[in-house]
Image: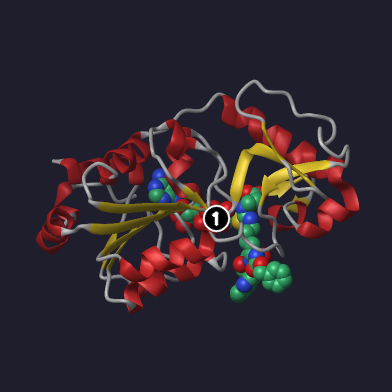
């Protein structure tokens, strides 16, 4: 495993970091790996729950077929996340919102660790594990930390489901559009801890690059995006991102 050294941060990247005004960061499960959150794919195998690949248990069809099973999967993950804290990668990204005049943070993660690290206005393109939503009136209910999950919608009594985007479902209205707009305007785009396989989120760096942004990937492994990047920092986000503050 490549150890993260400042030498990886090329002078050009350092200069662009110091000069940039409009910066976008896209994160995936890898940014939470050092907090103890299991990733879905890193390390070759994809996550499995009770014999089902995660993109089956986390699918729109499963909500129709077996909502209690979907809740069991997300209740289990909420239980794991309750004990976990942001790591130096989340903390560095939270500091960056005060460094750059126009800073945008887009995450595929539903774990809320960016917000716990102090990041504001996080664009959660795949929703949040800390909210429930009514399947019919779409009322949302906060389940942060110790709130118990309401049995049914307090407004129309219909069933509640996790307020996350499942496979085969559209992203939250406006979230992707806002992220795509910011991606098309940014000068510097960091892609941190994602395998760049899940769309449409994986299309955001391509929008940034084709709009003239300088693209930097941070990941211990190569991804389908790596060849497309101006610079690839090979290593752990929690070790590499704090190096930019120096
Ligand atoms: C949709 C919430 C429209 C739930 C998630 C185009 C081409 C092919 C397929 C499609 C396409 N368009 C749409 C699709 C289908 C599908 C898709 O992309 N499938 C993939 C599998 C091919 N997309 C959808 O279904 C999307 N919706 O398209 O709707 C539509 C609707 C109706 C009808 C027609 C069209 C919705 C996708 C969102 C699904 N929900 N999450 C939950 O969490 O359970 S996706 C979920 O998986 C995450 O949010 C994330 O997006 C993805 C996992 O990816 P990563 O976060 O990147 O994590 P991964 O484990 O894969 O990789 C971790 C990386 O970190 C690795 O590279 C590793 O090396 C690195 N790493 C590890 N440690 C560290 C590290 N990096 C840095 N530091 C470390 N320490």
Reply above or below: 84 against 90: above
Left/right of residue 124 with respect to residue 118 in the rendered view? right
Tell which of 170 and 230 is nearer to you. Answer: 170
Q: Please rate how many residues cluster around mark 1, counting C-alpha atoms within 10 Å: few if below 14, some from 14 to 19, many from 20.
A: many
Q: Where is residue 118 drawn, in percent x and y?
A: 38, 33
- Residue positioned most to the bottom: 210
Tell which of 158 and 197 is nearer to you. Answer: 158
Q: Measuring 83% from the left and 50% from the top, which residue is drawn there?
A: 136
Tell which of 173 and 60 is nearer to you. Answer: 173
Q: Does the beta carbon of the residue at mark 1 sit less than 8 Å from ligand 1?
A: yes
Q: Where is residue 194 drawn, in percent x and y?
A: 46, 57
Reply above or below: 9 against 122: below
Q: Measuring 72% from the left and 65% from the top, which residue is drawn there?
A: 168
Residue 141 location, quadrant? top right
Q: Where is residue 155 drawn, in percent x and y?
A: 82, 36
Q: Is residue 51 visible?
A: yes
């Amino acid at each position: 495993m490549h150890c993260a050294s400042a030498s990886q941060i090329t002078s050009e990247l350092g200069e662009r970091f110091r000069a940039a005004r409009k910066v976008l960061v896209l994160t995936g499960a890898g940014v939470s790996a050092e907090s103890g959150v299991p990733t879905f794919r890193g390390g070759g195998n994809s996550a499995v729950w009770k014999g089902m690949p995660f993109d089956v248990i986390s699918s729109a069809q499963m909500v129709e077929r077996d909502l209690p099973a979907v809740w069991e999967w997300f209740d289990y993950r909420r239980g794991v996340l309750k004990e976990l804290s942001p790591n130096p990668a989340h903390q560095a990204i939270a500091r960056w919102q005060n460094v750059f005049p126009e800073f945008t943070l887009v995450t595929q993660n539903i774990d809320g660790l960016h917000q716990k690290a102090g990041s504001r206005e996080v664009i959660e393109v795949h929703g949040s594990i800390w909210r429930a939503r009514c399947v019919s009136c779409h009322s949302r209910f906060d389940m942060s930390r110790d709130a118990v999950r309401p049995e049914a919608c307090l407004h129309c009594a219909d069933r509640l489901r996790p307020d996350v985007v499942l496979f085969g479902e559209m992203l939250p209205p406006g979230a992707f559009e806002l992220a795509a707009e910011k991606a098309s305007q940014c000068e510097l785009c960091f892609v941190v801890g994602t395998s760049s396989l899940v769309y449409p989120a994986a299309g955001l760096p391509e929008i940034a690059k084709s709009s003239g942004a300088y693209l930097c990937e941070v990941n211990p492994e190569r991804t389908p995006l790596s060849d497309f990047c101006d610079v690839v920092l090979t290593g752990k986000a929690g070790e590499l991102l704090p190096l930019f503050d120096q």
